[in-house]
């Protein structure tokens, strides 16, 4: 093949390289110096990145950056990283990338947060927030660089929430939901300016629960007379709020929220309530009405995870892609479009909500919001207009992690109560929009993968599949007293006078780079790469 190509001019060769698979480009690179130089051109990797990553809607590795600013080397790195994770997931191993150890007073890391892109992270140590840069690409030098640190309110332990929609924007508030301090600060983070104040509220009506674009969400359910989730427009820096109300006897405690299909979905212990995205007044308060309320079959608790598995909806595999991959090679996409309304109509994808069962700590409950269509409209391919939020709630089989068995049970005996070992609960759940993620059961960290789920009566949708194989990583147990709460929720393991807790704040995951960060019990943290 190379001998025939040698007679062609470079312009023609470049056009051929742009149409070849990544595997073919890398193979041709090894044949001669001429092809080595041609396969290093930016236009070649721009074409492969657009066709293999963007067109297939794969999670994007690395920090957000305009495509025009990415160099040839960076485009190649990101393309190869995205395809490697896509082809190899979940058959990956965990390798410690960088490890940071803290000792002495203030060494404990209360929270670890990836900045979207997976190359920068924040650690919270008491009242201090530290910004780190991870210097690591396969085959290159690896290390950790201290970018900067900042104390929002001296002497007050804090907690960080990030805006997954706007990279580099975070909100900081007090960690103690019952304390007297009620500040909220919105900042931007970057390597040149680690902490730039965008908005500073000295006093807010609740504790910071999240941030999404211009909205700052405050949990006021623990406040005297508090009625739910209050929203501030931090960009306008006004004091008016929009209230997403709750019914305490019916909804239970606030757990989490997500923006989906043009609505704000608030997850409570007993249900999920749907609200329109509000226009926050400059002053005063407006109370929003529920568009829909979906009641769960059983109460849930933290941790809570959301995924749409959108990375699996980028279209059928392309024959020009890497010839070594067998991704869905035998999948009948025409048949799947008939069975999956959301895939057929190009609608907003389904949303899966996974959370630990409140009554059965060893079980992970899962529900899916599926586009609502009438049978007649299904045949016509037209979305039913019977609801302002046209989705139905479908219950998925719960995931029950493997449990420890007593010695008598292992030997075939009955096993008495005194011989039993506490079941292991899911204490951490980090899901990306693609369906990839990690979860922790006991100390064991495993992967979550996107997969096909059967929905009654004869429908299939992509949803999260919890892997049951050998643990990839062992997370430290963080011990607290029984009367101590973490993030407003108690993780009880049973037995003894202590609880062993792995908080949702102790682990974070970046799906684009395929890495997670874990806080260590004795101080410090580790960044682990999946390869």
Image (cartoon, rainbow, N blue to C red):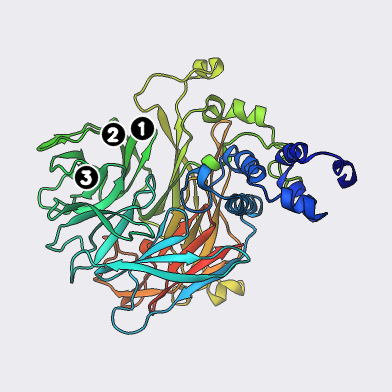
Looking at this rendering, what residue extends furthest in the front direction? Answer: 9
Residue 350, label in figure: none
Q: CA distance from mark 3 to mark 1?
A: 20 Å
What residue does disc 1 label? Answer: 262
SS at badge 1: loop
Quarter-wise, where is residue 423 in the image? bottom left
What residue does disc 2 label? Answer: 277
Is residue 316 something one can see in this rendering?
A: yes
CB within 8 Å, label 1 to label 2: yes
Q: Is residue 310 above or below residue 446?
A: above
Q: Residues within 10 Å of mark 1 (few under 14, many from 20)?
A: few
Front in this rendered view, residue 470 or 449:
449
Q: Residue 28's x, y, as percent?
A: 79, 50
Is residue 424 something one can see in this rendering?
A: no
SS at badge 2: loop
Q: Is residue 217 above or below residue 456?
A: below
Dot 3 or dot 1, earlier in sequence: 3
Q: CA distance from mark 2 to mark 3?
A: 15 Å
Front in this rendered view, residue 110 or 59:
59
Q: Residue 35's x, y, as percent?
A: 78, 50
What residue sits 42% from the left and 63% below the top?
A: 507
What residue sits 11% from the left and 62% below the top?
A: 180
- Foreground disc of the pair 2, 3: 3
Q: CA distance from mark 1 to mark 2?
A: 7 Å
Q: Residue 144's x, y, as percent?
A: 46, 71
Q: Is residue 319 above or below residue 425?
A: above
What residue does disc 3 label? Answer: 234
Q: Residue 429's x, y, as percent?
A: 44, 57
Front in this rendered view, residue 338 or 457:
338
* Quadrant into which the N terminus falls: top right
């Amino acid at each position: 093949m190379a001998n025939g190509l040698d007679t062609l001019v470079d312009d023609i060769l470049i056009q051929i390289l742009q149409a070849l698979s990544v595997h073919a480009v890398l193979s041709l690179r090894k044949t001669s110096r001429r092809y080595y130089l041609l396969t290093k051109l930016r236009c070649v990797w721009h074409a492969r990145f657009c066709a293999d990553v963007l067109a297939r809607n794969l999670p994007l590795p690395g920090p957000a950056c305009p495509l025009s600013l990415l160099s040839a080397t960076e485009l190649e790195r990101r393309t190869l990283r995205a395809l490697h994770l896509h082809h190899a997931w979940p058959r990956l191993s965990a390798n410690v990338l960088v490890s940071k150890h803290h000792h002495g007073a203030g060494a404990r890391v209360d929270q670890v947060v990836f900045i979207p892109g997976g190359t920068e992270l924040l650690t919270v140590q008491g009242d201090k927030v530290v910004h780190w840069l991870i210097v690591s690409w396969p085959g290159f030098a690896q290390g950790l660089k201290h970018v900067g640190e900042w104390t929002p309110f001296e002497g007050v332990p804090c907690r960080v929430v990030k805006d997954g929609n706007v990279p580099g924007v975070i909100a900081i508030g007090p960690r103690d939901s019952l304390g007297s301090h009620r500040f909220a600060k919105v900042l931007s983070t970057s390597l040149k300016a680690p902490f730039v104040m965008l908005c500073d509220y000295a006093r807010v009506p609740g504790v910071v629960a999240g941030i999404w674009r211009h909205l700052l969400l405050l949990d006021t359910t623990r406040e005297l007379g508090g009625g739910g989730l209050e929203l501030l427009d931090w960009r306008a820096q006004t004091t008016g709020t929009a209230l997403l109300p709750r019914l305490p006897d019916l909804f239970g405690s606030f757990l989490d929220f997500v923006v989906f299909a043009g609505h704000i979905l608030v997850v409570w212990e007993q249900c999920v309530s749907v609200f329109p995205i509000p226009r926050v007044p400059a002053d005063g308060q407006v109370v929003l009405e529920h568009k829909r309320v979906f009641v769960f079959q059983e109460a849930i608790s933290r941790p809570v995870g959301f995924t749409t598995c959108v990375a699996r909806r980028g279209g059928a595999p392309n024959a020009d892609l890497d010839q070594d991959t067998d991704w869905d090679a035998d999948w009948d996409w025409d048949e799947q479009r008939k069975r999956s309304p959301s895939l057929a109509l190009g609608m907003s994808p389904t949303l899966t909500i996974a959370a630990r069962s409140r009554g059965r700590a060893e079980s992970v409950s899962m529900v899916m919001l599926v586009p609502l269509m009438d049978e007649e409209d299904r045949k016509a391919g037209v979305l039913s207009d019977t609801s302002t939020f046209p989705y139905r709630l479908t219950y998925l089989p719960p995931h029950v992690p493997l449990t420890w068995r007593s010695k008598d049970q292992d030997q075939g005996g009955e096993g008495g109560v005194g011989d039993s070992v506490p079941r292991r609960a899911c204490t951490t759940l980090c899901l990306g929009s693609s369906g990839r993620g990690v979860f922790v059961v006991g100390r064991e960290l495993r992967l979550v993968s996107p997969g096909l789920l059967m929905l009654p009566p004869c429908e299939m949708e992509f949803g999260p599949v919890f892997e049951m194989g050998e643990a990839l990583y062992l997370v430290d147990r963080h011990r607290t007293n029984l009367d101590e709460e973490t993030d407003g929720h108690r993780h009880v393991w049973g037995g003894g006078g202590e609880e062993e807790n792995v908080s949702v704040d102790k682990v974070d995951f970046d799906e684009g780079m395929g890495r997670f960060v874990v806080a260590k019990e004795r101080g410090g943290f580790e960044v682990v790469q999946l390869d």
